[in-house]
Amino acid sequence: MRTATDTLDSARLTVRRFTSDDLDLVARLLADPVVTQHLGGPKDRAGAEQTLRTRALDYYDRHPGLGMWATIERASGRVVGFHVLNHIHGEPDIQVGYALFQDAWGLGYATEMSVRLLRYGFEELGLPVICAITNLDNAASQRVLLKAGLTRKGERTFVHPALAGEGSMAWFEAHRTTWHL
């Protein structure tokens, strides 16, 4: 994941870097009020373009090996959403996370690629700790994170404008020395 052509595979999924050609896809995903109900709400096209630029395209060069990647269903070649292994907004902590189109919910994709990204982060990047955050009322994502081997470690609030309005958020951690699946 350190170069533009790198991909990372799990049993049913592949992640790849986003390109500027993916703006329509990102805009469609981030405009969905159901998908984004726990991600700060829907974004217009300009907001989606800013997210693509700052959290993916510009981020790749500044943080080799980390990023926000298009998640692709290997059997069909269809992009089903995105997964991240990147910094929490305004924080030094590295998080694992995801957003999937509604028709990809309930298929185990969030857990499957989260596990693969945790393995990649620990084994290939040598990260000591990987975190995750989710809204307190997002029980589905909390279950995904627990299934992926993260442990709930209480709650945290954040000052970055992208997260400040969310209030307290559920905080999860996995440590390289103790994580296993």
Image (cartoon, rainbow, N blue to C red):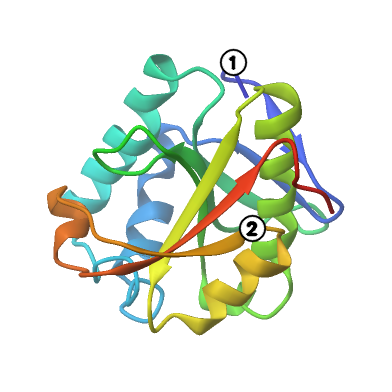
* Identity, as a three-letter code, of the amino acid under mark 2: Leu
Image point 52% across, 70% down: which residue? 101
Residue 150 is tagged as 2
Relative height, residue 126 to residue 39 (above, below): above
Q: Tell me where residue 127 appears, x and y as whole percent.
A: 60, 28
Q: Secondary structure at mark 1?
A: loop
Q: Looking at the image, which is closer to me, 44 or 95?
A: 95
Occupied quadrant, residue 53: top left
Mark 2 or mark 1, which has the lower sequence index?
1
| Spot occupied by residue 128 in the image (x, y as percentages of width and height) | 61, 30
The answer to whether residue 39 is seen in the rendering is: yes
- Residue on which the image places disc 1: 3
Which residue is depicted at the point 59% across and 17% down?
Answer: 2
Q: Quadrant of the C terminus?
A: bottom right
Horizontal side, residue 169 vs residue 172: left or right: left
Tag of residue 126: none
- Measured as percent of width and height from the top left, residue 160 is found at 16, 47
Residue situated in front as seen by the camera: 17 or 87: 87
Tell me if 80 is positioned left or right of 138 in this view. Answer: right
